[in-house]
Image: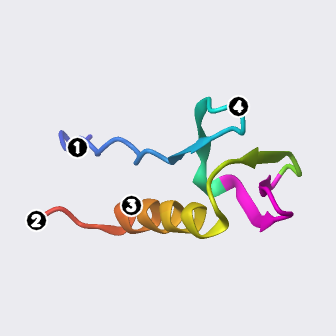
Amino acid sequence: MSSERRAPPPDRMIKVTRLNGKEFVVNAELIQFVEETPDTVITLVNHEKIVVKESVDEVIRRVLAYARGIRCVPT
């Protein structure tokens, strides 16, 4: 048995805002697609839909920042 400890799994959440102004987090890995209708709607892999204040471009930016963060190797 190795004495090495594994790093905890990375945080998989991105912060978004409901139309009523309340912030919450969504698991970025469960997002299936994002669309503007004109409100931004996030659809999860379980087909749940979430309407948020952020633009599609902002949601994409946050998901990409999350994805980059989990692929970074500490020096």
Q: Are marks 1 and 3 in contact (CB under 8 Å)?
A: no
- In the picture of the structure, the residue carrying the numbered disc 4 is 20
Residue type for callout 3: Ile
For image coordinates 89% across by 51% down, the residue present is 47
- In the picture of the structure, the residue carrying the numbered disc 1 is 2
Pointer 2 or 4: first along the chain:
4
Quarter that holds the N terminus? top left
Q: Quadrant of residue 69?
A: bottom left
For image coordinates 64% across by 62% down, the residue present is 55
Span highlighted in magenta in the image: 30-45
For image coordinates 40% across by 48% down, the residue present is 10
Q: Which mark is residue 75?
A: 2
- Measure the alpha-carbon separation of dots 4 and 3: 30 Å
Whole-percent x and y of residue 54? 62, 54
- Measure the alpha-carbon separation of dots 1 and 3: 24 Å
For image coordinates 59% across by 34% down, the residue present is 24
Q: Residues within 10 Å of mark 1 (few under 14, many from 20)?
A: few
Q: Which mark is residue 52?
A: none
Q: How many marks?
A: 4
Q: Assign a secondary structure to mark 4.
A: loop
